[in-house]
Image: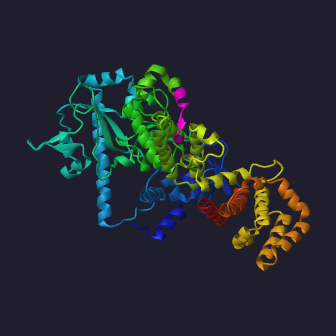
Amino acid sequence: MKYPKEYLDEIKLRLKVSQVVGKSVQLKKRGKEFIGLSQFKNEKSPSFTVNDDKEFYHCFSSGEHGNIFDFLMKTKSIGFGEAVRTLATEAGMQPYRFSNFDKKKDLRFQNYKNIFKDYSNYFHQQLFQTFNKDAVNYLQGRRINKNIMEEFQLGYVPWKNNFYEELSKKYSEEDISLTGLYYKNDKTGKYVDRFNSRIIFPVNNITGDTIAFGGRIIHESKMAKYINSPETEFYKKGNMIFNLDKAKNCRAETDEVIIVEGYMDVVSVYSSGIKNVIANSGTALTERQIDLIWKFFANPIICLDGDDSGQKAALRIAEKLISLINEKNKIYFSIMPEGKDPDDYIKQNGKDGLLNLLKDKQIIQLYIWNYYLSKVDQNNPFEVSKFEKEIKKLSYSIQDETLKKYVLEDFLEKIKKLTPLQTSKQGFNFTGYNKKKNYQILKETKLLHQKRKDLSKTQIIEFSILFIILNYFEIASKKIEELSEIEFISDKNENLKTSIIAELIEGKNKNLNQERINNEYKNLIKEIRENSNIQITTKDKTDQEILELLNELILDFKEQGNLKKIESLEKELINNLDENSYLELIKLKSQLNRE
């Protein structure tokens, strides 16, 4: 359902951006604007700017940009509808009414939340009743004190309690059934509490509303040790993160969050004083969950149990999520000692012990490499071959094209070290371990930039392009259009390029052309040869490889130009927050990502 533009404009008219943002960001007036520390990045110097006249905010450290609705959606992790309702109330406006279907769904959700609230409050009180002392004793035996029990609203559901009857006085049978808290006994027709004889852990959404539970048995039993609420209309396991509603408050202090396996791990680590700890809600970590985590923490650390099943689970997560990483959002892994989980470890080694262990965390691609390599017989060529294919396959899955390039290069360098005999034999070509040609050219292009310190990267690229078109006229003639479109920074380099292109277009005798150009630009050509290693790179290359190399250099030159424009626009935006400049900045960044 779409809200009418007039309704949204009225909210924005009544509420200033600084008024909304100022509730969670300490703003200081600077001219016509406000500045403050970013809500989206852990920083010490303010890069977050608010402009009431233009009705938007902008964060220079993260690139986040938007209006008051965007701000609530991104910082509170709520939907657009909820952001509109929240701000409409704050603006003193009546909520906008949609269809009967929407109204009924919203009413169901309100009842759903209220039932969970009543259930949670009642069984939290039951936890501290003397006849339920086994539950408190169990938690205290796990070193969970009363303050933590209360902060997490932990509860205990006694066997054969009659709370269903209490709920039925306020809510309909249908509303109670929708929560999944009870199931109907087929023989007796009565409703049975799903969490009988269990300690319950409230699972809250990002705004702190309880919408599900996890339950743990406290006595020896044939029943499952842990159970979770079934999925409902308003609770989807793959979207939920246990304790993120509390942990997100740490994002101003750190960009790291620890992801553990179970509810008890979270409570135990949290009680030690490490507040930035969460757990996936009874499911393998999903893409939706990691995207939600990244909204608050750029560097999550996955810290699962140290047994074989725990590490296999960690590997599955790594294989599944490596495709999503980028330069801003990463994933790390910390390996528990064998047979230990975070709860065990922190009890034996304390807060400092766990923090020291986390210092040895491995970034996702290194974790995958080390795990795979530990399972490979390096003397078995078939196993090494399979290993290389799997590593390459995972590299190719990375969606960020630039990062994919460098992760693949890193892996290939490591693979070379696994097969020293193949790389040391001169003149022996073993295609099973050769890199692909496009990878060779890519790496060689990178080497072109590692030149004399007194030359800029742009000038080195210009020299490299000029060397190719000076020495490979026929190959350069295939790129006349692209070469004509780019304009070199150096006037003398641009003049030489223009002269060569003119000769190529006229198509006169090539020897005469080259002789005239060599005479006219003698000193510049000498400088190009002395300060460019391109002649080494092009040696013994086929015409096609040189053409690909030229194309790569042209793309590199365009990228450098865009980077300079982006830098200039960002400086301009710092001094004057202008919407047109911002849109041009976004366009350039999008173009850069595509290239």
Using the rendered image of the protein, determine whether residue 253 is visible from the camera's viewpoint: no
Count every numbered label the image shows and give the total: 0
Q: Is residue 527 magenta?
A: no
Spot the residue most to the front. 427
The reply, left or right, for residue 400 in relation to residue 337 is: right
252 vs 34, nearest the viewer: 252
Residue 416 horizontal side relative to residue 318, left or right: right
Residue range corresponding to the magenta coloring: 355-365
The percent position of residue 294, horizontal first and vertical second, equals 50, 47
For the residue pair 376 and 115, the one nearer the viewer reads as 376
| Residue 359 counted in the magenta span | yes
Q: In which quarter of the image is the N terminus?
A: bottom left
- Residue closest to the far left: 187
The spot of residue 297 in percent (x, y) is 52, 43
Whether residue 459 is situated above or below residue 45 in the rendered picture? below
Q: Is residue 422 left or right of residue 112?
A: right
Q: Using the image, determine if residue 100 lies above or below residue 453.
A: below
Residue 399 picture location, percent across and down:
52, 54
Measured as percent of width and height from the top left, residue 38 is found at 60, 48
Tell me the quarter of the image containing the C terminus: bottom right
Residue for point 41% across, 62% down: 94
Pick whichever, 587 or 498, lies toward us.
Answer: 498
